[in-house]
Image: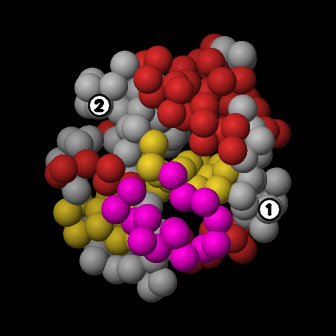
Amino acid sequence: MTTPETPTSVEEPGLLQGLPPVIGPRTRLVVLGSFPGVASLQAGQYYAHPRNHFWPILSALWDVDLRALPYDRRIDEMRERGLGLWDVYAHCRREGSLDSAIEDAQYNDLAGLKRLAPGLQGIAHNGGESARAMRFTATLGVPVTRLPSTSPANASWSFERKLDAWRAAFEACGIA
């Protein structure tokens, strides 16, 4: 496994490739997932699975029905509000969508987050697998939070409980 300090750009046969970052100069908070699920990879869109709570949580926080908007408009809304998206892993092998099935993971350039987002005020890891990289993101000098996963596989947390946790992280960066 590579480290965030030494990301790989070499693609090997059988490796799945993640999505590009949605991060810009106005980004204040970056949400880091682990790696896109099958539905997201097929659609080329973050959090494309219809049962994932990511877009419903943002909709509730911002009082905008993001699910009703085309994906490009959702991304525009995020950028306007200072939210960025990316994943911890750039490449991996995996059957299905479960984080527990991730193998041969190769990190994205997490050390470069502040270069991509000079106004970065916080990092929020979406779930436990992403949070495994907190030892790296904690070195960037901004608050780092582990949030409950928005994945439908995380059924032990109710939507309301997830929303409360996400609201606190967003409020800390002034984007709720």
Give the CA separation, mark 2 to mark 1. Answer: 31 Å
Amino acid type assigned to the residue bearing label 1 in the image: Gly
Question: Residues in magenta?
Answer: 131-145
Front residue (pair 123, 94): 123
Amino acid type assigned to the residue bearing label 2 in the image: Asn
Q: Residue at x 40, y 66 (%)?
A: 133
Q: Residue furthest bottom?
A: 6
| Figure check: 142 above or below 154 | below
Q: Are marks 2 and 1 in contact (CB under 8 Å)?
A: no
Q: Is residue 136 magenta?
A: yes
Front residue (pair 95, 82): 82
| Figure check: 26 above or below 162 | below
Front residue (pair 172, 64): 172
Q: Mark 2 sits on what residue?
A: 154
Expressed as whole percent of the image width and height from the top left, the position of residue 69 reads: 67, 20
Q: Residue at x 72, y 61 (%)?
A: 120
Expressed as whole percent of the image width and height from the top left, the position of residue 135 reads: 42, 71
Q: Is residue 166 magenta?
A: no
Q: Residue at x 54, y 76 (%)?
A: 139
Disc 2 crowd rating (10 Å Cα; few below 14, some 14-19, many 20+) is: some
The quarter holding residue 174 reads top right
Q: Earlier in the sequence, mark 2 or mark 1?
A: 1
Which element carries disc 2, helix, strand or loop? loop
Q: Mark 1 sits on what residue?
A: 119
Which element carries disc 1, helix, strand or loop? loop
Expressed as whole percent of the image width and height from the top left, the position of residue 75 reads: 69, 37
Expressed as whole percent of the image width and height from the top left, the position of residue 140 reads: 60, 74
Q: Residue at x 51, y 68 (%)?
A: 137
Give the side of residue 94 with respect to residue 140, left or right. Answer: left
Quadrant of the image for the C terminus? top right
